Structures are given as C-alpha cells and as structure tokens.
Amino acid sequence: MMDRKAELAANLARVEERIAAACAAAGRKRDEVTLIVVTKTYPASDVRLLADLGVRHVAENRDQDAAPKAAACADLPLTWHFVGQLQTNKVRSVAGYAHVVQSVDRPKLVTALSAAAEKAERELGALVQIALDAGTGERGERGGAAPDLLGELADAIAGAPGLRLDGLMTVAPLAGPYAGREQAAFERLMELSSGLRAVHPAATMVSAGMSADLEQAILAGATHVRVGTAVLGARPRLG
C-alpha cells in the first residue's frame, strides 16, 4: 500500500507541475484551476490514498461503480463529481452522493435530477455538458447537448428546485469541425461560458481538459480539469 501511495504521490506531483506551468503560460494564478481526479475503475483504497495526499475533488462516470465507492469513503472530506452519461433510472442513486453532476444534457434529466435532489433534501450543482460534435438540436456521440440548446438547459436548471447552475463541461470531440483541435474546442467553450455568465452570473465553472489536453484547457480558461490516467496510471483495474 505504501508503494501505491508513493506512486500516486509522484504522479500527482507531475500533474501539479503541468498545471502550474500551464497556469504560468496563460498568465493565470495556480489557484484559479481545480484538479478533479477521475477515479473510475479504481478502488476505494486509491480514493483514500488520494485524500491522504490532499486531493479534495474526485469524479466517477458510472453509478454502479461510484455509489459503493462513495459510501465506502463517506467519512472523507471529498467533493464527488459525476461526469458520465446519466440515465434517468440512475438519478436517484447519483443524487444521494454526488455534489456536482457535470453531464446534464437534456430537459428530462433536469426534471429527474430536481425531483431526486428534492427527495434527498440536497442541493446538487449541475453543469450543462456541451457537445461540440453535435448538430443543431442534437446530442453528441459522447453525450452532451449542441451549443444551441445551452440557453434552454441553463434556464431549466436555474429554475429547478434542488439544483444549482454551476457552469459548463465539455469533452474534446473526436469528430466534427473541432476533432483534433482541442485548443479551438476549449476556446469555443469559453465563448459559450461568457454568454452563459451574462445571463447567469454565478455559473462560472468551466470543466474541460483531461490527462492529454489539460494544458490547452487551462490556456483557454478552464476552471476545472478532470485527470484520471496521469494520476492513477495504468494498473490492473476493477472488472
């Protein structure tokens, strides 16, 4: 276990160096960017080690993995982010442990999350997931709503009991006009964020960038980066 902790500490240090360097290159303060460690497929024991190492934000993308892990780590001072495509039949479970749902991409999900949050007597942060590979009025291959749907979804979240509109999230697209153009994709997300903040000033969170492209996201202005592999490494995973 100590070997694993040392491995995670070294990986975290390398990621921290990358984030600090990217902030410096962008003329930003280091504390403007929050690291979210994506712990999907990795055990609760890793989450505990990460917490010991100072990590405070973790993310999951599948409820069947996340729910038991969050329960096993309920005593830790962590903020849990749900970042995967979310089906409405999983909403009640997710609303029980997630603090922020980053993957809100359709009105039906807003309604379901609101009802679940109210029932759980919790307030959930919600991000509109933007799909930059989606055509007008459509959803993306990896979830997310087309940019033209942003206003409708943002207003729905802002008006929904139990939900708090926190901002936007995207995943760099693999197809469409932004494929292979991560910097341009993240800059487009920042343009959308600026428009969103004009209507909803408190929606300042911009979640973008992962292990391979966190520098481009920070340069564009992301407030949160979601890093999995660069921290947890390639090791035998849960089945």
Image (cartoon, rainbow, N blue to C red):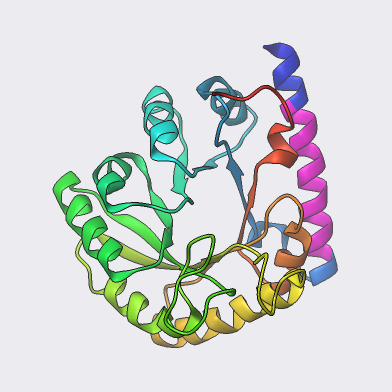
Furthest-left residue in this view:
119
What kind of secondary structure does the magenta stretch mostly adopt?
A: helix
Q: How many marks?
A: 0
Q: Which quadrant: the N terminus? A: top right
Left or right, 202 with reference to 141: left
Q: Which quadrant: the C terminus? A: top right
Q: Is residue 12 above or below residue 33?
A: above
Asked whether residue 97 is drawn in magenta, I would say no
Measured as percent of width and height from the top left, residue 23 is found at 77, 63
Measured as percent of width and height from the top left, residue 32 is found at 64, 62
What residue lies at 71% left-to-right and 25% top-to-bottom?
Answer: 235
What residue lies at 38% left-to-right and 52% top-to-bottom?
Answer: 86
Furthest-top residue in this view:
1
Q: Which residues are magenta?
A: 8-24
Q: Is residue 116 above or below residue 11?
A: below
What residue lies at 77% left-to-right and 34% top-to-bottom?
Answer: 11
Closest to the observer: 213 or 7? 213
Measured as percent of width and height from the top left, residue 97 is found at 34, 39
| Residue 53 figure quarter | top right
| Residue 201 figure quarter | bottom left
Measured as percent of width and height from the top left, residue 8 is found at 72, 28
What residue lies at 48% left-to-right and 62% top-to-bottom?
Answer: 143
| Residue 71 figure quarter | top left
Q: Is residue 138 above or below residue 56?
A: below
Left or right, 175 with reference to 130: right
